Amino acid sequence: MDPLYIVLGALVVVALVAGYGFARLRDRLRLISAQTKVADITAKALREAENILKDSELKAKDELFRKREEFNREMEQARSEHREQERRLEKREDVIDQKHQLQLKKERTLEHNQRKLNERREQVEKRSRELEILIQRQTEKLQEIATLDRTQAESLLLERLESELSEEVAARIQKHEQQLRVACEEKAKAILATAIQRYGAAHTADTTVSTVDIPSDDMKGRIIGREGRNIRTFEKATGVDVIVDDTPGVVIVSAFDNVRREVARLALTKLIQDGRIHPSRIEEVVKETQEEMDKHILEVGKQAVLEAGINALHEKLMQLLGRLKFRTSYSQNVLQHSLEVAHLCGLMAEELGLNGQLARRCGLLHDVGKAADHEMEGGHPKVGAELAKRYGETSKEVLHAIFGHHDDVTIDHVYTVLVAAADAISASRPGARRETLEKYVKRLEELEAVASGFPGVEHAYAIQAGREVRVIANASQTSDSDAIRVCRDIAKAIEEQLNYPGEIKVTVVRETRAVEYAR
């Protein structure tokens, strides 16, 4: 063959082989590119699937949170309606009880008036019989005198004169006693006025509203916690009731014990400021706040002892005095009241030449039983005397003043009288104690009702904020002696039937007016 054809054939073969290899290489490259595109599409599809799944989960969580919030709102609304219904029922029960008590008092007043009317009828009948007997005796004596001689007549005359003189002597003695009583009252008033002027303290009435401010209403949900676990833990740890209602920016803490309520208020304030609200943190903060409160109470008691200027007391007594800062009586702070009584007792004792420090000690401790009267049996005078004796108080004057400042026992020491007087002054000062308008009006109506139920009474008026009852008696039906008796009976009926702070003055006015016109 021709070498040229051989070379050409070889080139053709080489060209075919190269074309075939190039085709295979191109196919391989296309395959790799297709696989890369498939991988990219698969990865993109996976990413889109993950995004869709995450969006679905977020939407489900949002829907669950919204449903839970709606459920919590519905539950809170139901609780509010339930509490409102309970308050209405309690108010209705109080109104029924008040009506029942008023009906009982009216029945007792009617029975009392009926009994007094029967007694008066019996007295009138008895006086009529006595008058008939006296007339009969006078008639017999006249008949005897007509037959007496000179000696017998003189003897009878002297006996009569002696009887009349004895009545005059008794009247003179009574007059001097009355003058002495007036002088003693003037001296006592001067001493009381001097003590009150020297100790012009500000009003001691105090109001305690346990509310906690929150930065936003979202904090209420955190205070309640998941399924209410936070609020249950807080109430269990503090012993109070936490009221979370629709009032914006406020959470209310309610408890019978003022110390527990104050501890709860401070602890809740700390939790809100800290922001970490969960059961373990709640227990930790409450325990810390209770320890701080115990120290604060002891410091308040020590400060009261220093302010009263008396010798050191047992630490437990000072702690009890500190607890009185969180106790009120008729809205009057008991610790401030005790300090005021202590200073008034000291001033009056010094005016009388007695031991002023001992008097202040009696006055400061006279209401110490109110710090523990809910933990022990008996009234606060008895509880206070037992506690003072238990914690090292050995002075008989102090123990007797604590036990007898409400006239529960026979008064044997002058310091007890001073404490009772200072207690009445502190409680009756204007602005010292407050009461609601409903109770105030009710007390005035009860005073007037009791006074109007006696025979011969035309009108009765409660004046001086209920501390005096002015009674207008019918002059034609009531004599001067009857007016005195009615006044005493009204005062006794008020003591037996009504509850009131301090004392109430009863004044019966009986007068006859003659009116004529000159024309």
Image (cartoon, rainbow, N blue to C red):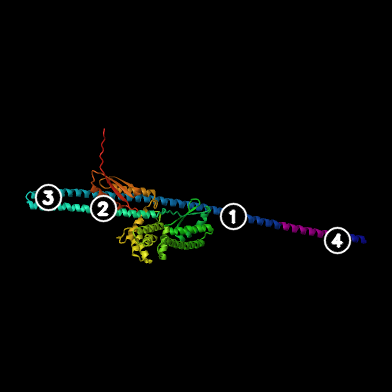
Residue at the spot of label 2: 178
x and y percent of residue 287 in the render? 48, 63
Decide if residue 355 is on the left or right side of residue 287: left
Give the residues in magenta.
14-37
Q: Which residue in the structure is indicated by mark 1?
A: 58
Question: Sequence-wise, which precedes: disc 4 or disc 3?
Answer: 4
* Gap in angstroms between the C-alphas marked 2 and 4: 158 Å
Residue assigned mark 4: 14
Rendering coords of residue 413 (x, y %):
31, 61
The amino acid type of the residue labelled 2 equals Gln
Residue 319: mark = none
Q: Residue at x 30, y 53 (%)?
A: 185
Question: Which mark's residue is nearer the viewer, 1 or 4?
Answer: 1
Three-letter amino acid code at disc 3?
Arg
Query: Dot 1: within a 10 Å radius of its alpha carbon, few (fewer than 14), some, or many (20 or more) residues?
Result: few
Q: CA distance from mark 2 to mark 1?
A: 94 Å
Q: Magenta span: helix, strand or loop, mainly?
A: helix
Name the mark nearer the viewer: 2 or 1: 2
Comparing 495 with 221, the one in front is 495
Residue 216 located within the stretch drawn in magenta? no
- Is 290 positioned to the left or the right of 450 in the image? right
Query: Residue 15: within the magenta?
Result: yes
